[in-house]
Amino acid sequence: MNTKLVIVADLGLLRAYREVQGQMDHQPHLELVEEVKSEAAHEKLSEQLTDQAGRFPRGSGTANVMGDLSAGERLNLETEQNRRLTDQLAERINLLLADQEVTRCSLAASAPIHKQLLDALDQKALSKINHLLASNLTKIDPSKLAAYFEKADS
């Protein structure tokens, strides 16, 4: 069976739809097969971190007085979190496209993660992707998704 998937993703949400052929004169429609929401993508970093201020020494010297301790902020923490979330999305897409019944796929990923997501996908998964958009279509009605991919082709 030849199955076509339509996958839309942003950093916090992945939706995968299967194209289902309509009867006689009906157009194909999309059926939701998987939805993955990442709670970490919607939380503030301060909600995720448990370190309390005053745990790390300030500067290169040793801290002997409580006032010599800094908040210990880690730079690029948000960038690292985005990379991990994008890798998780790629893992999920790889699993969806590993199915032998899936022969082709249309993928739309939000622009900020588009390139990194493509870099993280397997060659086997990439070979099944025939339409690719750098656009966040996660909030678009499934019945209108096909038009976005058709517009990109022309």
Image (spheres, grey):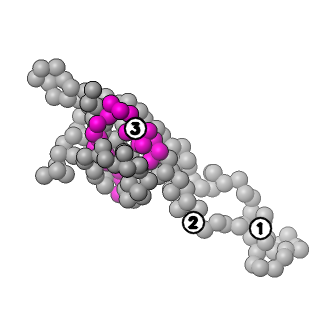
Q: Is residue 85 left or right of residue 67?
A: left
Q: What residue appears at the point 71 percent right and 67 percent down from the top-left corner?
A: 72
Mark earlier in primary sequence (2, 3)? 2
Q: CA distance from mark 1 to mark 3?
A: 45 Å
The residue stretch that appears in magenta: 89-111
Q: What amino acid is at disc 1?
A: Phe
Above/below status of 21 relative to 121? above
Q: In the rendering, at what x and y percent does residue 114 appear?
A: 37, 56
Q: Which residue is mark 2?
A: 76
Mark earlier in primary sequence (2, 1)? 1
Q: In the rendering, at what x and y percent does residue 9 appear?
A: 38, 46
Query: Judging from the image, what secondary structure is the residue with disc 1 in?
Result: strand
Q: What residue appears at the point 53 percent right and 53 percent down from the top-left corner?
A: 84
Query: Which labelled disc corresponds to residue 152?
Result: none
Q: Is residue 56 left or right of residue 133?
A: right
Disc 1 versus disc 3: nearer the observer: 3
Q: CA distance from mark 2 to mark 1?
A: 17 Å
Disc 2 versus disc 3: nearer the observer: 3
Q: Which residue is mark 1?
A: 56
Q: What residue appears at the point 38 percent right and 59 percent down from the top-left corner?
A: 115
Is there a contact, CB below 8 Å, between mark 1 and mark 3? no
Q: What amino acid is at disc 2?
A: Asn
Residue 154 within the segment the image draws in magenta: no
Q: What residue appears at the point 44 percent right and 53 percent down from the top-left corner?
A: 120
Q: What amino acid is at disc 3?
A: Ala
Front-most of 66 and 17? 17
Q: Which residue is mark 3?
A: 98
Q: Quadrant of residue 67?
A: bottom right
Q: Is residue 14 left or right of residue 75?
A: left
Mark earlier in primary sequence (1, 3)? 1
